[in-house]
Amino acid sequence: MLQKRAVWAEATKPSLKLRVLSPYENKAGTAENPLRYYEIDFLRALKDDNTLDEESLAHTIMSLRDTVEQKLRGYSRKDTVDYYRKIVSQAWAQVEQAGTVDLASNAYDEQLLWLMLDPNQRTRTETVFKERNFQPNPLWFWWWYGYTTYNPNPKYKPNVNVPAQSPKPPVIPGAEFANNVATAVERTSSNIVLNLEKFANSILPPAPKVSHEPARTGADCVCACHACACACACVSCACACAGGGAH
């Protein structure tokens, strides 16, 4: 949601507190930038104090899980996973092959949702930017959230209300960039709601499958996993997923 600039994190302790930004106050988006069903559910899980309600957030997760399970019926789960692993590899290749700091930084932003699916995102980011810098853009809220929240000495503050009027940000050393991205995801995940136990207990197991449908001929995978993974990333770290995924 940060990547879509639909929200801004105003606090992370004792739990995440989000402010919905214009033009998403209606929690539906606009004709040009409509929100997907799981994004709408995520925003509706916000309480009056801008923290996330544990039971409502759990409902968002279960609804997403059940929708993706339904889309996967009749398709090979293994082939689907392999298909998206190849896309993640291609996303890394675009970042690695970028010739300049600006191109590499832009490629990372454009491919962010795919890169987040990589369990080795932190170490891979450290490797890619080991000998190069990162040039953030004032519009990249997903980056500024982590930078302003977890950097002990932030030297830049973005203009959240009018980001286009922000001054040019400083260049970030590659190692610092990689560490900040990973830290933001890890720490926010642990503070997504005030009562993690209540949230976890509210997620009911999926209904048992009563039959096995034959695999569909002529199709080995379905474009549903990206929606699932990206939305789960959104829920777990309150960022990023809003820019991509299947409907």
Image: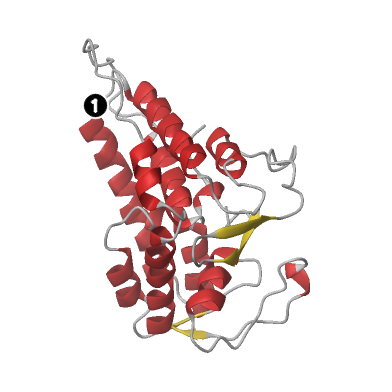
Residue holding disc 1: 76
Residue at 61% from the left image edge and 57% from the top image edge: 18
Residue at 67% from the left image edge and 39% from the top image edge: 34
Query: Is 200 placed above or below 118 here?
Result: above
Percent position of residue 126, x then y: 33, 76
Front residue of 149/119: it is: 149
Tally the numbered discs. 1
Task: Report the coloring of the rendering.
Answer: secondary structure
Q: Quadrant of residue 28?
A: top right
Q: Is residue 113 left or right of residue 125?
A: right
Percent position of residue 149, x then y: 53, 75
Mark 1 element type: loop
Query: Is 6 placed above or below 184 here?
Result: above
Front residue of 81/104: it is: 81
Q: Quadrant of residue 170?
A: bottom right
Percent position of residue 27, x then y: 68, 41
Residue 97: in sight, yes or no? no
Front residue of 54/98: it is: 54
Amino acid type of the residue tagged 1 in the rendering: Ser
Badge 1 local density, few (<14 within 10 Å), some, or many (20+)? some
Q: Is residue 137 left or right of residue 69?
A: right
Q: Is residue 12 left or right of residue 61?
A: right
Residue at 63% from the left image edge and 82% from the top image edge: 169
Residue 183: in sight, yes or no? yes
Query: Is 100 placed above or below 238 here?
Result: below
Percent position of residue 79, x then y: 24, 33
